[in-house]
Amino acid sequence: MKLKLSISMDEETVRVLEESLKEGRFRNKSHVIEYAVNSFLKQN
């Protein structure tokens, strides 16, 4: 089950995130954030 979250991010970070979406690397913004958080958690 997935839960909804609301976050605030730096404008430049969002711009880079949106570029990744345009390149087709991720399905949507949620996919980017979930991938980043999971990657972070695996490293720690």
Image (cartoon, rainbow, N blue to C red):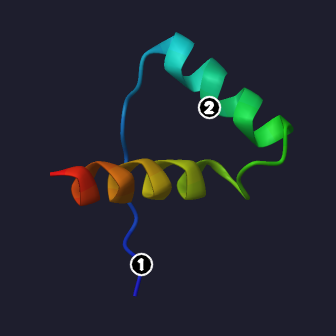
Instruction: Indicate which disc residue 2 carries.
Output: 1
| Residue 23 falls in image quadrant | top right
- Type of the residue with mark 1: Lys
Q: Is residue 29 left or right of residue 9?
A: right
The picture places residue 13, in percent across and down from the top left corner, at: 51, 20
The picture places residue 11, in percent across and down from the top left corner, at: 52, 13
The secondary structure type at the circle numbered 1 is loop
Residue pictured at 54% horizontal, 11% vertical? 12
Q: Is residue 21 left or right of residue 43?
A: right
- Mark 2 highlights which residue? 17
Closer to the camera in the image, 40 or 17: 40
Q: Is residue 44 left or right of residue 31?
A: left
Q: Earlier in the sequence, mark 1 or mark 2?
A: 1
Instruction: Indicate which disc residue 15 carries.
Output: none
Look at the picture and state if 43 lies above or below 20. Answer: below
- Type of the residue with mark 2: Leu
Give the class, few, some or many, for how many residues have Cα within 10 Å of label 1's Cα (few <14, many ≥20): few
Look at the picture and state if 25 lies above or below 31. Answer: above
Q: Could you tell me how many numbered marks the image carries?
A: 2
Residue pictured at 63% horizontal, 22% vertical? 16
Residue pictured at 40% horizontal, 88% vertical? 1
